[in-house]
Amino acid sequence: MLRTRFAGVYDGVHVLPFFTPFDGAAAGFDPIDHTKVDPRLGSWDDVAELSKSHDIIVDAIVNHMSWESAQFQDVLKNGEKSEYYPMFLTMSSVFPNGATEEDLAGICRPRGESRKFRTPKSLTRRGRHIGRAASSCNMRPLR
């Protein structure tokens, strides 16, 4: 469409999240793997081809990932020993002195969920609460 109907109209395009799965619980903002284009949308070759004719801004959403991601699954399995553990916010890393209800209410929840932190069963015994960025399937990295 950019090369036909809109040829010459736009020099660039902002591409929304296209990682697997683009239609997850958070409408594409919960990728399982940031390195894979959802095959229903195309491939990295398609992105490269588009870049030959247009400037591209890709919404890489590096501050979100699915609870199904290999990184978070490793945290569930290995806890603080996981090499990926520092990628995820914990309640204690955000609120080292504990959080009041007012503190928690200050965390924006645009999709209507009330709990800002969740304790996965495998981390319960360690007393860790993991932050949720956009939905129950999203995590917010520390970096």
Image (tube, rainbow, N blue to C red):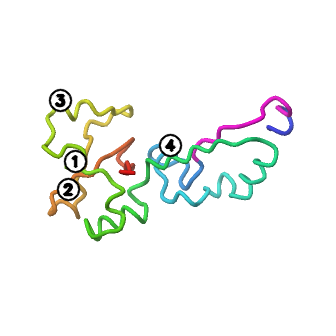
Residue assigned mark 2: 128
The answer to whether the residue labelled 3 contacts the one labelled 2, judged by CB atoms less than 8 Å apart, is no
Residue assigned mark 4: 27
Q: Nearer the viewer, residue 57 or 41?
A: 57
Compute the Cα span from label 4 to label 3: 29 Å
Disc 1 marks a residue whose amino acid type is: Met
The answer to whether the residue labelled 2 contacts the one labelled 1, judged by CB atoms less than 8 Å apart, is yes
Secondary structure type for disc 2:
loop
Mark sitting earlier along the chain (4/3):
4
Compute the Cα span from label 3 to label 2: 20 Å
Residue assigned mark 3: 102
- State the mark number for residue 91: 1
Magenta span of residues: 6-17
Mark sitting earlier along the chain (4/2):
4
Q: Is residue 60 left or right of residue 57?
A: left
The residue drawn where x is 39% and y is 49% is 138
